[in-house]
Amino acid sequence: MAAALGAGSGSAGPPGLPNSAPGHAALPAVAVWEWQDEFGRWRPYRGSVCSFIEQALQAPAQKGRRSGTGLASSSIPLGQADATLAPYVIDIPSLMQFRQDTGTMRSVRRHLFAQDSAAGQGIVWEWQNDEGGWSPYEMKVCVFLEQAFTHGHQHVDLSSLGYNYDLDLVSLVQTNKTSRFRRGIQRRMDTPYPVITATGSLHMAVACSCQQCLLNSGTGPITTRYRHSMINLPSSSAVPQVSSRTAALGSSALSFVPYNKPTLSGARSAPRLNTQTAWALPQPMGAGSPSPGLSASNGVSVQNLPVEMPKPSKVNQALAGGVITSIVQMFPFTGWWKSLIASMMDTVTVTPSESEQVVRRYLEELRGAPADEDCIICMEKLASPSGYSDTCECKTIKPDAVGQLTKCQHAFHLLCVLAMYANGNKDGSLQCPSCKTIYGEKTGTQPKGKMEVSTFTQSLPGHQDCGTIQIVYSISRGMQGPEHPNPGTPYTARGFPRYCYLPDNEKGRKVLDLLRVAWKRRLIFTVGTSSTTGESNTVVWNEIHHKTEMDTNLSGHGYPDPNYLDNVLAELAAQGVTEACLRQ
């Protein structure tokens, strides 16, 4: 890995970290250690935990200078820094976090920020989760928010960071731009992250020109804003701005949010998406091939796209061959006959797969692609071949074919939409990656369970004129299926049965009917990582908020809440569950 980094004072760092490169001035920086969740987001450890990790790396080096050895610790138990992290151990050679009681492993990395950034000052920005606790934003988001806050900006749009949120820094409210659901945010002081000595450029702002942004901009599809704003961006002392070219783009480039969909890998642009961090610790090389987890020689790790394309039937080929031979023998083989025969051969031998039929059902092929518009799935120009043409072979869709969704009119490479569909649930529905318009009937990955409904006369605060509807959700632990993050791995189901409440009035009953539809479509819950406990492979809520308390709303999960019914109706509509579903 091409990185020049010293973790301590002077030019020498602890073993396992590259020393300072000659010719580069050493700069003070703060080191933030982060772990990666199943959505590809990097979640920071607390400053005290990061200081412990740095000390653990530094101690063997200092001891080695005295003894002549200097071998770094191969594993670091995090429970010694934070009792709540007792099950976790970081394995330094492989840069993996290992949970001892479940065997779960996650990638970790060491990310550097300027000393005057939010990380260096110990400032953390957090959002209120569904359980009423507070979860930190990614550190790059914290740095971005703190820069805006210190410069007096009242509103912040997180589109440039891949989030579909607007933040009000005065009222401390985060708003989902699609569903309009609002939740609280907070800014608090915590332990500053450890100061180290580094060489080269640091992470200064959104998509800056440092190695970390250039080589580690995320694991999911990136937005046009990322692709065209790698240079000429402000330093840490300036407010992040967007390049003029990006600002002129349509809303399709600004509203794309990569979460909730599996990462599409294998495109020509994948090296920009799926990389090892430039500041990661180098892994030891064996006598044979590189150890698992090492990137390719150019520092890029690219997975193959798991798209299955149909092969022509041998029976159809044989039949087609016989028909063509007979026609050739019976009629003169003139030029226009050649075109006719070729088209007949294609018609007979190529049968579109179900996935291709879904793509053709919802998109109309365009004859001329817009010259200056990007496909936000592969990030190639629409006038150029699809970024998935190297890994996806399809007889019925050409690499340069461009289609337009029939409702929202957003355009993409047809092959890119096919790859996106093949990486999803393959339930016959499509969702526009730009505006989130749903085509067909969207289904989710909710495990099997039971939904029970009852009513009683007690009123909810704010709804004294009616009784209460009680919903009870019951889901048991089980094994993950092919639609889940880790097929074949057990999942847990904490906190079930879960009790939820609605007012027993006209709007409350409408919400109940729509929730029944969402339950049948497996949209209420999913399998993922708990935002409260950090536990992975567990059943969690799936962006349709429920009220789990009756008598108080101090946690945000109870009553009174005059906006709740409207909020949940908007969230259901964002999942394709509307009043029109009740009339079917």
Image (spheres, rainbow, N blue to C red):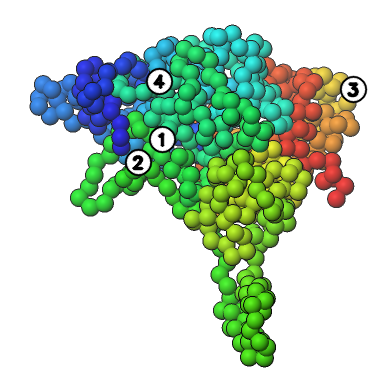
Q: Nearer the viewer, mark 2 or mark 3?
A: 2
Residue under numbered circle 4 = 113
**429 relative to 226 in the view: left or right:** right
Q: Do the numbered discs 2 and 1 sit on residues whose CB atoms are within 8 Å?
A: yes
Tell me which numbered mark, 2 or 3, is placed earlier along the sequence.
Answer: 2
**Amino acid residing under circle 1:** Leu
Q: Identify which residue is drawn at 66% across, 39% down.
A: 434
| Amino acid type shown at disc 2 | Gly
Image quadrant containing the N terminus: top left
Secondary structure of the residue carrying tag 4 is strand
Q: What separation in Å lies between label 1 and label 3 (alpha carbons)?
A: 58 Å
Q: Is residue 547 above or below residue 448?
A: above
Inter-mark Cα distance, 2 to 3: 64 Å
Quadrant hosting residue 159: top right
Image marks 1 and 4: residues in contact by CB distance under 8 Å = no
Tell me the element at label 2: loop
Q: Nearer the viewer, mark 3 or mark 4?
A: 4
As drawn, the label of residue 299 is 2
With respect to residue 222, does 4 lie above or below? Answer: above
Q: Earlier in the sequence, mark 1 or mark 4?
A: 4
Residue where numbered disc 3 is placed: 465
User: How far apart are the two marked residues, 1 and 4, measured between alpha carbons?
Assistant: 15 Å
Judge the density around disc 2: few (<14), some (14-19), many (≥20) Cα neighbours within 10 Å: some
The quadrant where residue 427 appears: bottom right
Residue drawn at 66 percent across, 62 percent down: 354
Gap in Å between the C-alphas at discs 4 and 2?
21 Å
Tag 4–tag 2 contact (CB < 8 Å): no
Residue flagged by tag 3: what amino acid is it?
Answer: Asp
